[in-house]
Image (spheres, rainbow, N blue to C red):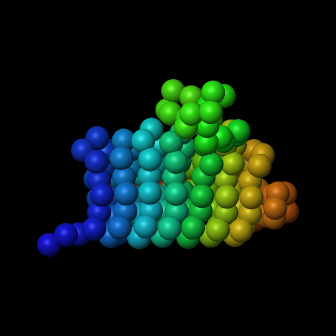
Amino acid sequence: MNDFRSIAPDVQLGAGVKLAQFVNLYGCRIGDETKLGTFVEVQKNATIGARCKISSHSFICEGVTIEDNVFIGHGVVFINDIYPRATAPGGALQTEQDWHVDRTLVKKGASIGSGATILANVTIGENAIVGAGSVVTHDVPADTIVAGNPARILRKVPSTHGVTAKVANP
């Protein structure tokens, strides 16, 4: 029976990882107790920490690092190329040698709402919240709520809603 998962042999899965059907994983690392929803793709050289939840239809591209305890809503897309082009200067289709990966970092405890787009070279701070549908074009400070297109700071995360409590290691 086919379980409809495509997991390359070079994928590193932590203990207790839960994978829905129709995931596509290659060359990536997924931390302990992380859950990936249906139709999630995680590309090579991407890292997802422990105890994260990546909701369905999300795309984690090469060069993205997601630290521990991060929530990614449905249909979140990361971008890893600031100046994407189909062809090289000579007119031929680009190959991997023509391309430069721009990095993105999502720090621990952050939450990214459904339908958000996260551009390259961005850091989303610890415990920050990105509103649904936002387009993040600049760094998001820790403990801050941003929303809109482009995403703008709305306010600080209320202390009662921050992820400030320490989680005991099992």
Position of 12 with respect to 52 (left or right) is left
Looking at the picture, how far across and down is residue 77, in whole percent?
60, 58
Residue drawn at x 55%, y 37% is 93
Q: Name the quarter where the C terminus is drawn.
A: bottom left
Looking at the picture, how far across and down is residue 133, in whole percent?
71, 68
Q: Which of the 4 image quarters holds residue 22?
A: bottom left
Residue drawn at x 37%, y 62% is 23
Q: Name the quarter where the N terminus is drawn.
A: bottom left
Looking at the picture, how far across and down is residue 140, in whole percent?
75, 49
Q: Is residue 98 above or below residue 145?
A: above
Task: Name the outermost residue toward the front.
Answer: 91
Position of 75 with respect to 127 (left or right) is left
Marker count (numbered): 0
**Residue 44 at least partly seen:** yes
Residue drawn at x 74%, y 54% is 136
Looking at the picture, how far across and down is residue 100, in whole percent?
59, 31
**Residue 71 at least partly seen:** no
Q: Is residue 35 above or below residue 45?
A: below
Give the camera-side residue of 167 and 117: 117
Give the camera-side residue of 68 and 26: 26
Residue drawn at x 82%, y 57% is 150
